[in-house]
Amino acid sequence: MTTACYSHEASSGHVTPPGHPERVERMQAVAEGLAGLELDRREAPLAEEAEVLRCHPASYLARIKAGLPEEGWSQLDGDTFLSPGSLEAALRAVGGTCAAVDLVLSGGAGNAFVGCRPPGHHAEQDVAMGFCLFGSVSIAAKRALEEHGLSRVAIVDFDVHHGNGTQALMWDEPRVLFASSHQMPLYPGTGAAEERGAHGQIVNVPLRAGSAGAVMRAAYEDVILPRIDAFRPELILISAGFDAHADDPLAGLNWTAQDFAWLTGRICDLAAAHCGGRVVSTLEGGYDLPALAASVAAHVGVLKERSA
Ligand SMILES: [Zn+2]
C-alpha cells in the first residue's frame, strides 16, 4: 500500500489579489515539499454539484457561480475573493478529497493527502469566509457516511485557526467527531472549549499565542487523542493547516515541522488501532512558503512511512 496524493493545476487558477496570503505560490511550495516523496500521484477530479449540496444549499452554490468575475476579482467578504478560475479550483478541492476517501476506503491506498486550494474549513452552510468557499473535509465526511455506509468518522483540524465552518456543518451530526486545536484569541473568534456540538461530539482545544510544540503535544495526549480513541473511528480525516508553524505570518504559535510530523504519527497510531490506518488529509492554511514546504514534507513523509 502507498500514499495517494491528489492535486490539479486548476488550484493555481484560483487567483487572489496581490499581497493576499492565500496565494497561487502556495501550490509551488506544496509541490516542493512533496518532491522527494514517492507517492501515488493522481489528478483531483471535478466534484459533481450534488457533492457540494451535501453540506451547502443550492442557493449558496448559485451565489458563488453568479459571483464569478469574467476577469480580475469579485469579493465575497473582507478576505475571500473569486477569480474566473475559482469555482473549478474549489470543485476540484472537494472532488480530490472525496476521491481520496473513495480510494482509501476501497483499499486502493493506505492513506492520502489532498494538496489543493482554496482551503475549506471556514466555509459555513451559506457563508464564504476566511479564504474558503466549500467545506471540503465536511463534504468528504458526509460522503463516507452516506455513500460508504460508515458509522463513525473523526475529523482532526490542526490548522492554527478554528475550523468554524466544519464545526457549523457538523454541529448536529452525531456520526462525526470534530476535534480542533487552534490559537485563541484569533480569527474567526469561535472554538471555545464550551462549544461541544449538539451531541457532545465537538472537541475544541484553544491554545495561547506564543505556545510551542510541547503545549500542543500535551493537549493532544491529554484531550484530543483520548476522545478519538474512545470514538473508535472507521476513518480519520485531517484538516491539515500548517499556519501554527513558528514562521507563519498570520498567527503566533511556535510549532516546528517536527511537531507536525509527531502529530501526524500519533493520528496514524489511532488510525492503525481502529481503522486499518485509513487517513485522508486535506490542505487548509500555511502562509510562509518555506515553512509550508517543510511542514508538508514532514506531514506527508509520515503518512508515507505509515501507509506500508
Ligand atoms: Zn488557518
Image (spheres, rainbow, N blue to C red):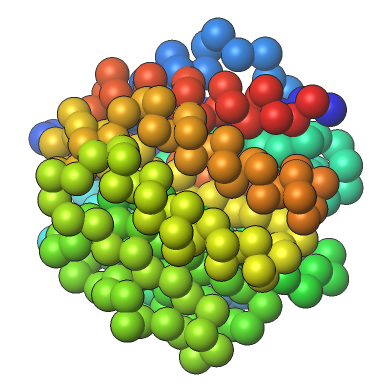
Q: Residue at x 38, y 21 (%)?
A: 293
244 on left or right of 268: left
42 on left or right of 72: right
Image position of 109 with respect to 231: above or below? above
Residue 16: % across, % down: 24, 41
Residue 145: % across, % down: 75, 71
- Nearer the observer, 113 or 225: 225
Q: Residue at x 63, y 31 (%)?
A: 303
Q: Residue at x 72, y 70 (%)?
A: 152
Q: Residue at x 19, y 70 (%)?
A: 189
152 on left or right of 49: right
Tell me if I can see residue 177 in this picture: yes
Residue 114: % across, % down: 57, 39
> Which part of the image, by quadrant, shows the C terminus?
top right
Image position of 198 with respect to 283: above or below? below
Image position of 96 with respect to 169: above or below? above
Tell me if I can see residue 119 in this picture: no
**Most extreme residue toward the top, as rendered?**
36
> Which part of the image, by quadrant, shows the N terminus?
top right
**Most extreme residue toward the bottom, as rendered?**
198
- Nearer the observer, 158 or 35: 158
Residue 237: % across, % down: 60, 53
| Number of marks | 0
